[in-house]
Amino acid sequence: MRKVAIEILLIILISLFLSLVYNAVSPSGLRILPKKTEVRSESAINVSDGIIYI
Amino acid sequence: MSATVSFIFRIVVGGIFLIAGLAKISDPVRFLLTLREFQLFPEMIIRFLAVYLPWLEFILGLFIILGILYRTSALFLAFLNAVFTLAILSVIIRGMEIDCGCFGLFADILKLPDSADIKAVIRNLLFISICLYIFFIKETVFSLENYVNSAYREKT
């Protein structure tokens, strides 16, 4: 029973490692964790091109 | 006789899940969309499963074919199929008509039936039976595990 449990854990770890590595390097990899959303203030002022936007 | 049957079952079931895993690894977005349609888990869990499950199927299929940790892999695959069966049954009970996502891209290429319906449930029950046969019948032929064990016994 213990042998089976250890073997299952080994299989889970091997497949987890391979899946995460492949996902990280593959161009079609998925984002697992949610992206941090940027919150912009409505009254933000941008002076990058000399024009002030409100 | 039972060792030969076990070997044939290993090749069939291992081959099916190795190919199914490869099909989903090659198109994770499609598998993600299919998992979403089941409406069973939150988004982050679905994304993790879309990345992890195909590789788990691929590794289990590979180990069963090669005969490495094949009995444990067969048991694990039987458990996985039981979970898939419950998911499909939940879809049927809720009256939804969706793809089961079992064979991914290959279902389109090979024109295989891939709906989450009663046929998929019967198919999964058949896979569970075959996997349990492989687990409970200890003898098999052409397995790396047996080869390594006999080589180790000869040395000692």
Image (tube, rainbow, N blue to C red):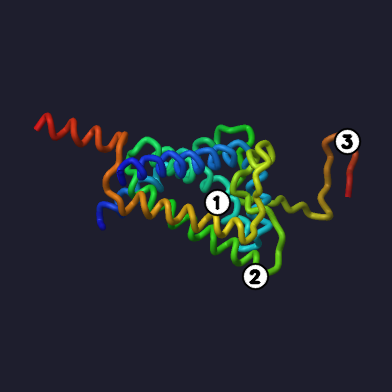
Q: Position of residue B152 (x, y in %)?
A: 16, 33
Check residue B40 in the rendering and tell me which mark sits there, or answer none: none
At a point 69% along the width and 51% down the height, the residue shown is A37
Check the image and name the residue furthest to the left: B156
A40 left or right of B59 in image: right
Disc 1 crowd rating (10 Å Cα; few below 14, some 14-19, many 20+) is: some
Element marked by disc 3:
loop
Image quadrant where residue A48 sits: top right
Distance (Cα) linking label 2 and label 3: 62 Å
Disc 2 target residue? B93
Distance (Cα) linking label 3 and label 1: 49 Å
Chain of residue at mark 2: B
Mark 2: which amino acid? Answer: Ile
Mark 1: which amino acid? Answer: Leu
Image quadrant in which the C terminus of chain B is located: top left
Do dots 2 and 1 share one subunit? yes
A25 or A3: nearer the viewer: A3
At a point 56% along the width and 45% down the height, the residue shown is B51
Q: Is residue B34 above or below residue B22?
A: below
Check residue B49 in the rendering and tell me which mark sits there, or answer none: 1
Foreground mark, 2 or 1, reads 2
Chain of residue at mark 1: B
At a point 64% along the width and 36% down the height, the residue shown is A28
At a point 55% along the width and 32% down the height, the residue shown is A25
Check residue A50 in the rendering and tell me which mark sits there, or answer none: 3
Q: Position of residue A44 (x, y in %)?
A: 81, 50
